[in-house]
Image (tube, grey):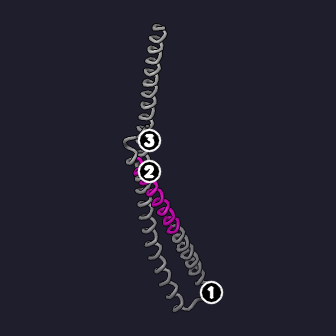
């Protein structure tokens, strides 16, 4: 009966690939969320910027203008922070993708080794079967000669 001697190693590599896939997908989801948040912040900033540019015509009070300016600075800060979050999550996602690709390659190598080992086993079985049939034919030949 055939048994691949590295089956446990292959099973471990398969499980590791699955773990890395899950982690990769979680990182992708987190990246999409961070990018969405960044888009929201930038949209809010543009909306506020447009509102501030219209204050010259509408005659907004200086106190309200100061409040809007502070809010604009706060949004600039939030956008910068969120851009850093997006950059970090992109880097983490790319690192995980590289880890996943390496794990897939390692698994594929072992699968090829198992396939090659299986073919070798099948060839050996065929040789043993042929030897057995040859011996039977020889024994039958002796039986026929004795009669």
Neighbour tally class for label 2: few under 14, some 14-19, many 20 plus, Cα within 10 Å = some
Q: Residue at x 49, y 66 (%)?
A: 30
Provide the secondary structure element on which disc 2 rests. helix
Upstream in sequence: badge 3 or badge 2: 2
User: x, y percentage for residue 113?
Assistant: 41, 37
Q: Examine the image and state in which quarter residue 93 appears.
A: bottom left
Residue under label 3? 111
User: x, y percentage for residue 89?
Assistant: 44, 64
Residue range highlighted in magenta: 10-34
Q: Is residue 124 left or right of residue 57?
A: left
Upstream in sequence: badge 1 or badge 2: 2
Neighbour tally class for label 3: few under 14, some 14-19, many 20 plus, Cα within 10 Å = some
User: x, y percentage for residue 8?
Assistant: 39, 48
Upstream in sequence: badge 1 or badge 3: 1
Residue under label 2? 14
Above or below: residue 29 compared with residue 51: above
Screen quadrant of the N terminus:
top left
Residue under label 1? 58
């Amino acid at each position: 009966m055939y048994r691949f001697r590295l089956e446990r190693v292959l099973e471990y590599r398969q499980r590791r690939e699955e773990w890395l896939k899950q982690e990769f997908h979680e990182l992708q989801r987190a990246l999409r969320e961070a990018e969405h948040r960044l888009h929201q912040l930038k949209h809010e900033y543009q909306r506020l910027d447009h509102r501030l540019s219209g204050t010259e015509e509408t005659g907004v009070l200086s106190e309200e203008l100061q409040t809007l300016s502070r809010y604009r600075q706060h949004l600039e800060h939030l956008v910068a922070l969120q851009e850093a979050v997006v950059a970090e999550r992109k880097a983490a996602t790319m690192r995980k993708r590289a880890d996943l690709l390496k794990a897939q390659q390692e698994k594929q190598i072992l699968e090829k080794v198992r396939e090659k080992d299986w073919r070798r086993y099948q060839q050996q079985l065929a040789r043993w079967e042929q030897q057995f049939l040859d011996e039977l034919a020889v024994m039958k030949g002796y039986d026929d000669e004795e009669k």
